[in-house]
Amino acid sequence: MKKPTWVIDKERARRSAANETLWLFGLHAVRDALQNPARQKLRLLATRNAADKLTDAIAASGIEPEIEDPRKFSAPLAPDSVHQGAALEVKPLDWGRFDDVCAAGAGAPLVVVLDRVTDPHNVGAILRSAEVFGARAVIAPRHHSAPETGALAKTASGALERQPYLRVTNLAESMMALKRMGFTVLGLDGEADMTLAAALGGAGDRPVALVLGAEGPGLREKTRQTCDQLVRIPFGGQFGSLNVSNAAAVSLYAATMAR
């Protein structure tokens, strides 16, 4: 019996994911990945100088570095990558089941949901803020979002190894799942009537999901409709728009202080 097309596509996607690897670069990102026992590490390319700086992390990882000529660094990186003489090929992290991480994972009952935020530098900065404020996870759609990349890891400054980054098939369905877990889902919108502080006060002790959209387009209509409430960060000047990573940091701080 011939398999349905959707079954074939799903199996193909699973095989593709199993073969997927990425290159992390820069001393900080590579050191944190080497020291992360949950990270599957495949190849380490390093100059002698970089390897000396990573001695302890290399020893802890058990991986043997391939020493590179600094003038002919062979890692397949973009020409403008500031690699500092170190690049590590790895498998993407597996954080486990969405429900397990969000409902009962480590950290505060607080998650960040990103609606089509594709800039790896913004997502890296958001992961860093999420770790600082103890959020349980950062959630993004599998498509039209920033995947794990070396640039994201470098901006995250180690947070990619410690802060769950969950990429889901359907963002609206995942938001509904958060509601069933008891989360209050708040969408950031600069033109909303209610302030973030007022909404957080109304949420009481309930877990909170902060939903942020891409700069420019903002939240998609389906995402807006799925939120419990649209809220805004008040501003004092005539210009009231924050970069999405800054808005995430402010919102995480507000949610943490509201507890």
Image (spheres, helix red, strand yellow):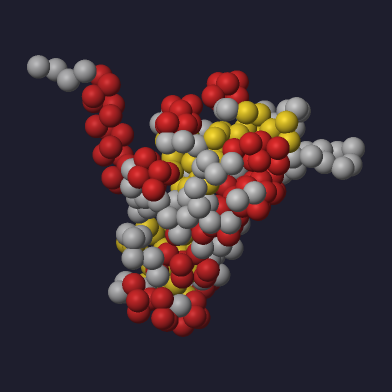
Q: Examine the rendering and report whether any part of residue 81 can be seen.
A: no
In the rendered image of this protein, does residue 81 appear above or below residue 73? above
In the rendered image of this protein, does residue 36 appear above or below residue 105? below
Relative to residue 141, is residue 126 drawn left or right?
Answer: right
Residue positioned 48% across, 50% down in the render? 136
Which residue occupies the extreme right position in the image? 238
Task: Find residue 26 and report its horizontal and vertical position in percent.
Answer: 53, 66
In the rendered image of this protein, does residue 135 appear above or below residue 66? above
**Relative to the observer, which residue lies in front, 78 or 114?**
114
Q: Quadrant of residue 113?
A: top right
Task: Find residue 169 and report its horizontal and vertical position in percent.
Answer: 41, 31
Residue positioned 31% across, 39% down in the render? 16
Relative to residue 141, is residue 246 drawn left or right?
Answer: right
In the rendered image of this protein, does residue 250 appear above or below residue 89? above
Give the quadrant of the N terminus: top left
**Relative to the observer, which residue lies in front, 13 or 182?**
182
Q: Examine the rendering and report whether any part of residue 257 can be seen.
A: yes
Q: Quadrant of residue 60?
A: bottom left
Task: Find residue 248 and report its horizontal and vertical position in percent.
Answer: 64, 46
**Relative to the observer, which residue lies in front, 98 or 91?**
98
Task: Find residue 227 and report its horizontal and vertical position in percent.
Answer: 57, 27
Residue positioned 31% across, 34% down in the render? 13
**Relative to the observer, which residue lies in front, 256 or 259?**
259
Residue positioned 34% across, 60% down in the render? 38
Which residue occupies the extreme left position in the image? 1
